[in-house]
Amino acid sequence: MTKVSVVIPVFNQSQLTQRCLLSLLSHSHSLSRVWVIDNASRDDTAAVLNRFHESFQQAGISFEVITNPENVGFGRACNQGVREFLKTDASHLVILNNDTWLMPNWDTALIEAMKKRRLDAVGPYFHEKPFHDRMEQTAQDFILRNGKGFRHHFVAILMFFSREAIIRLSQDCEGTHGGIFDERFFVTYEDADLLYRMRGLNMQYGQTGSCFIWHHSKATRESGSLPSNYEREGLRLFIEKWGFDPIPADHTWKARLRRRYWRIREKLGKF
């Protein structure tokens, strides 16, 4: 039986968390467990999570909150949820940003895409224009045009893994005591590190046009909650670990042309 578990790290931004959880509660088909890792939020996040606890429980979905006394960073918070996931019999794990909205039956679409292409991990298309009340219709229109599309691309906003992939990544991970993220990265480059480890393990991943989510671009940065040197420190750790700077590769003429190509396609409503 397919059972999907979700891990959501949060720090403040309760309005975004509320929107995310509402879509998760309303639009999921195979969801069995949710772990929200609260990194010592200072707003009304705790009250929001308390209200959703009852709603998820009534829907037959386990909803647990792990509250940290301080902000331990994205990777370490996610690993707390990963360790809980590995204690269950769930078949899939999702690492989800709280600044998102998920379309109806998002989980079914990702499961089908994973099975069809025999992937270890899959991600959705993410829409970053302003949120509006007709987002479900926008999602439907996008799927009609692009539902068969696929890209060999890693999506860090919603990371959908098979259980086998989580086990392999947790066994491969250094800098942690169980989990899939190297916890030395606080909140940036942890996804790049994960991607390069997946490549080293010859894991298969991609982005499907059959699933649509909305994402509040740069919401974490706008919150003002990050250390002033977080990007520089993340880059330093990445170079120290991997022996190269990943930034120059993003600024070659080929990389710039590729990004321009995808921006044009996006403006045309294409995947």
Image (tube, rainbow, N blue to C red):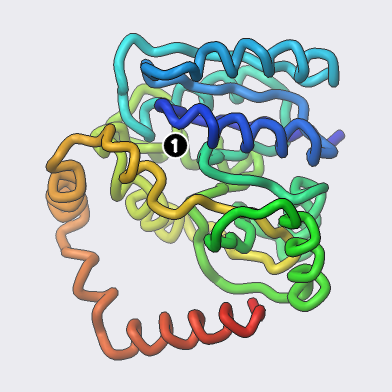
Residue 258, horizontal then vertical, whole percent: 42, 85
Image height of 53 relative to 109, above or below: above
Residue 5, horizontal then vertical, whole percent: 68, 31
107 left or right of 240 in image: right
* Residue picked out by circle 1: 180
Question: Which residue sits at x=22%, y=68%?
Answer: 247
Q: Between residues 228 and 203, which one lies in front from this camera angle?
A: 228
Q: Secondary structure under badge 1?
A: loop
Question: Which residue sits at x=62%, y=37%?
Answer: 20
Question: Which residue sits at x=14%, y=40%?
Answer: 228
200 left or right of 20 in image: left
Snapshot quadrant of residue 251: bottom left
Q: Amino acid at mark 1?
A: Ile
Q: Between residues 92 and 263, which one lies in front from this camera angle?
A: 263
Q: Between residues 257 and 206, which one lies in front from this camera angle?
A: 257
232 left or right of 83 in image: left
Question: Which residue sits at x=37%, y=17%?
Answer: 42
Residue 4, horizontal then vertical, whole percent: 73, 34
